[in-house]
Image (tube, helix red, strand yellow):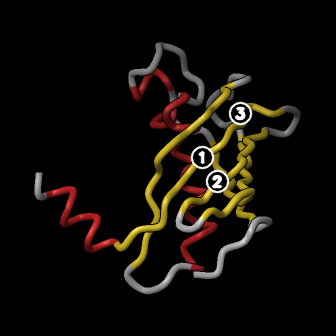
């Protein structure tokens, strides 16, 4: 595994009905739901590290800090950017930001830990 601070990834999405607070049950308005904002931010971090992991490794989320700053209605394009800011052994810390054409709609940090996929699944299902 060769991961170092500065690694970046981007993801561009368009807010669709299945991404709205109405659809996911986190509210009753037709805008990007906070849980979907988080899911897209996590996708961006996963996408960043995937090519740098050894065969059989994956990363799992362990901590999130999220500020959802502005509403994004249906049809809005939102660009997610994640940057690896800290590597501490298997622990990875990312800063992320989500922007539409005119403003920041969300930002925060996501921590992930690199694990052996098979061992992780085995421990998770043995409970």
Q: Earlier in the sequence, mark 3 or mark 2?
A: 2
At a point 54% along the width and 55% down the height, the residue shown is: 43
Tell me whether circle 3 and circle 1 mark residues in contact (CB < 8 Å). no
Q: Nearer the viewer, residue 76 or 118?
A: 118
Q: Residue furthest bottom?
A: 55
At a point 67% along the width and 27% down the height, the residue shown is: 67
The secondary structure type at the circle numbered 1 is strand
Crowdedness near tag 1: few (<14), some (14–19) or many (≥20) residues, C-alpha within 10 Å = many
Q: Nearer the viewer, residue 126 or 67?
A: 126
**Above or below — where is 120 with respect to 127?**
below
- The residue under label 3 is 106
Alpha-carbon span between mark 2 and mark 1: 6 Å
- The residue under label 1 is 110
- The answer to which image quadrant residue 7 occupies is bottom right
At a point 69% along the width and 23% down the height, the residue shown is: 71
| Quadrant, the N terminus | bottom right
Q: How many labels sit on residues?
A: 3
Q: Residue furthest right?
A: 102
Crowdedness near tag 2: few (<14), some (14–19) or many (≥20) residues, C-alpha within 10 Å = many
Tell me whether circle 2 and circle 1 mark residues in contact (CB < 8 Å). yes
- The residue under label 2 is 93
**Above or below — where is 46 with respect to 20?**
below
The secondary structure type at the circle numbered 2 is strand
């Amino acid at each position: 595994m060769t991961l170092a601070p500065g690694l970046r990834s981007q993801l561009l999405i368009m807010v669709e009905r299945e991404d709205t607070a109405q659809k996911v049950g986190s509210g009753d308005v037709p805008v990007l739901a906070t849980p979907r904002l988080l899911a897209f931010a996590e996708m961006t971090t996963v996408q960043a590290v995937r090519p740098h992991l050894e065969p059989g490794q994956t990363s799992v989320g362990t901590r999130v800090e999220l500020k959802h700053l502005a509403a994004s209605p249906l049809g809005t394009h939102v660009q997610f950017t994640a940057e690896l800011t800290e590597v501490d052994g298997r622990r990875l810390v990312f800063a992320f930001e989500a922007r539409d054409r005119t403003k920041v709609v969300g930002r925060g940090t996501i921590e992930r830990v690199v694990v052996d996929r098979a061992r992780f699944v085995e421990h998770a299902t043995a409970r």
